[in-house]
Amino acid sequence: MEKEIEYNLLVDIRGICCAQPIIRLAKELKNIEHGEVILAVSDKTSMLNDIPAFCNKTNNQLIHHEEVNGVLRFWIKKI
């Protein structure tokens, strides 16, 4: 089994849709230090496009993403 990626803050964006998940991520990123990592958890497949686009636009780093039993997990490093 691969080593779990460490993170500083868990952001659960399951069950919310439209722009709300990205708005919540942007808010949480403002509250952490540069170099820290957020683990965002979602159940919306649209996040497979939205989160990488958000990271690209805001110059934050999408370290890794995966799907486990229908739950999407995204590790985002604040740059």
Image (tube, rainbow, N blue to C red):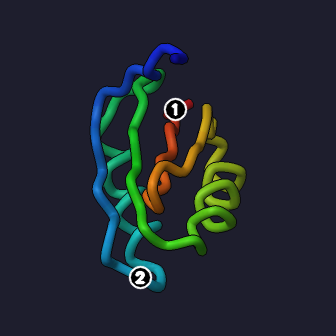
Q: Residue at x 68, y 66 (%)?
A: 49
Relative depth, front residue between 29 and 62? 62
- Tell me the kind of residue under disc 1: Lys
Coordinates of residue 16 in the picture (x, y in percent):
34, 78
66 versus 49 height, above or below: above
- Under circle 2, the secondary element is loop
Tell me what residue is drawn at x 30 percent, y 27 percent: 8
What is the number of the mark on residue 53? none
Dot 1: few (<14), some (14–19), or many (≥20) neighbours within 10 Å? many
The residue mark sitting in front, 1 or 2, is 2
Residue 42: where, in percent of width, then height? 41, 62
Side (left or right) of 77 relative to 30: right
How crowded is the residue under tag 2: few (<14 C-alpha within 10 Å), some, or many (20+)?
some
Q: Look at the image and tell me whether residue 60 can be seen.
A: yes
Which image quadrant for residue 47?
A: bottom right
Q: Secondary structure at mark 1?
A: strand
Front residue of this view, candidates 44 and 76: 44
Q: Which residue position holds label 1?
A: 77
The residue positioned 48% from the left and 49% from the top of the image is 68
**Disc 2 marks which residue?**
17
Q: Is residue 77 above or below residue 12?
A: above
Q: What is the quadrant of the C terminus in the image?
A: top right
Q: Position of residue 9 (x, y in %)?
A: 28, 36
User: Up-down: is 55 above or below 42?
Assistant: above
Tell me, yes or no, if residue 26 can be seen here: no
